[in-house]
Amino acid sequence: MKRANSLRHPLRKAGLMTRFRFLTAGESHGRGMLATIEGVPAGLTLTEDDIASDLKRRQVGHGRSQRMRLEQDRAEVLSGVRYGVTIGSPIALLIWNRDWENWVEVMSVSASDRPAAPLTQPRPGHADLAGATKYGLSDIRPILERSSARETAARVAVGAVARVFLSQFGVAVHSRTLAIGGHWARRSEVGDWAMVEASPVRCDDPEAEKAMISAIDEAAARGDTLGGVFEVVADGVPVGLGSHVHWDRRLDGRIAQAMVSINSVKGVEIGPAFRMADSIGSQVHDPIEPSDTAPYWWKRGSNQAGGIEGGTSNGQPVVVRAAVKPVPTLRHPLGSVDISTREVVQAHFERSDVCIVPAAGVIGEAMLAIVLADAVLEKFGGDNLSETLRNYRGYLESIQG
C-alpha cells in the first residue's frame, strides 16, 4: 500500500519539519500580554472567538482573586490570519491588561526621575529571591511581574489555537479537578465534561465539590491558600506521536516538562503512575487484544499507561495529572529577609488567589494541546492544512494494512 508522502520526506530524518512553537512576552501589570506562534499551516479556520472561550474559562473558579473580574481577557489577532483563515505565517496575539491604567508609573517602559520604591521583601515559594539574585537586581518587582501566573493568559490563547488545529484530527482536550485541600473526587474512567464546566471548582463529583468549596472558604477566612490536583485528558490522539529514539522526542517527557512549567505545578504523572509504583507488573499493564474497529486492528481493555508507551502515543486517550502547590502569596506573609538591608521582615503581599487549581486545569489543557499540536506537525508535516490531513489519512490507511 502506498504510504503518505510526508513519511518519506528527507527533512523528517534531519529534524527540520514543521513544528508548533511559541513565545510569550509581557508583565503582569504591564500594558498587555503577547504571544507569537509559528508553524500553524495555512488553511485553518481561526477566529478571535475561538480563543475567547478558553480565556474566559481560565478566569473562573471558586477562590480566584478580584483581578479576574477586572480583566475580562480577549485576544486580538494581529497577524497570520486573513479573512478568518490562517495564511502560514507567524500568528501574533495581544491581550491587553485592563489593570495597567493603575500601574502606568510603576511599570513605565521609559526612564523616570521618580521611579517607584523598590520591593525588597521576597516571598517564600516565589521566584523573587532566586530571580533577583540571578539577574543582579535590588528590586524584586521585575521578577514577580514576569514570573506571575498572568503570563499563562498568553499560553491559554496559544493553546486555544492548538486546540482548533487538533480538532481537525479528531483530538479533543478536557480537564477536571481531582482534589483541593485534601478532598478527593471519585474518579470515573470518563469525565462528565458538561458537569465539570458547570462546577465552580471544575469537578464532576458533587459531594467532593461541596467539600472543596468549603475548604477554599475556610482557607480564605484564615488568610491562607490551598493546592490540589487536576487531570487533563486528550481523546482521539493517534498512535505514533513522539518517539523512543531520543530522550527529547519522548512524548511523555515533553508533556511533563510542559505541565511543570505551569506556575505552582510541582509534580506530574502519566496515567495512575504513583499508584502503579506500589503495584506489581501484572496489575498495571494493558493487555493487547485484536479488534475489527478502525482505525487500528488492536485494542486495549484498560489505559493504565495513560496513552503513552515508550515515549510514543499508543492510540489510547492521553491522561495527565498534575499536583499544584498552594499559592505562595499569603495574606499573612511568612518570614523573609530584606534583600537591601538584610533585616528580618515579613514577605511582600500582593493581591492573590486563594486556590488556582480549577484555573490550572484549563492552563494544563493549553499546554497539553500545544505539545500534541507540535507532535502532530512533527509527524505529518505540511505547509497547508489539506496537505497535513492528507498525510495523516495516508498514515492511518497504512496502519490498517
Image: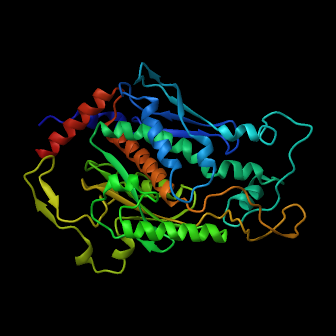
Q: Residue at x 21, y 36 (%)?
A: 393
x and y, in percent, of residue 156 in the image: 49, 44
Residue lying farthest to the left in this orientation: 292
Asked if residue 341 lies left or right of residue 148, the reply is right
Residue lying farthest to the top in this orientation: 83
Asked if residue 48 lies left or right of residue 26, the reply is left
Depth check: give the residue in front, 210 or 77. Answer: 210
Residue 5 visible in rendering: no
Image height of 271 relative to 385, above or below: below
x and y, in percent, of residue 342 in the image: 87, 67
Residue 320 visible in rendering: yes
Q: Residue at x 54, y 55 (%)?
A: 261
Image height of 271 relative to 239, above or below: below
Asked if residue 140 lies left or right of residue 374, the reply is right
Q: Quadrant of the C terminus?
A: top left
Q: Quadrant of the N terminus?
A: top left
Rendered image coloring scheme: rainbow
Q: Residue at x 24, y 53 (%)?
A: 315
Quarter assignment of residue 35: top right
Depth check: give the residue in front, 290 or 98. Answer: 98
Depth check: give the residue in front, 40 or 34. Answer: 34
Q: Residue at x 39, y 53 (%)?
A: 198
x and y, in percent, of residue 241 in the image: 32, 48
x and y, in percent, of residue 369 in the image: 40, 46
How many numbered marks does the figure carry? Answer: 0
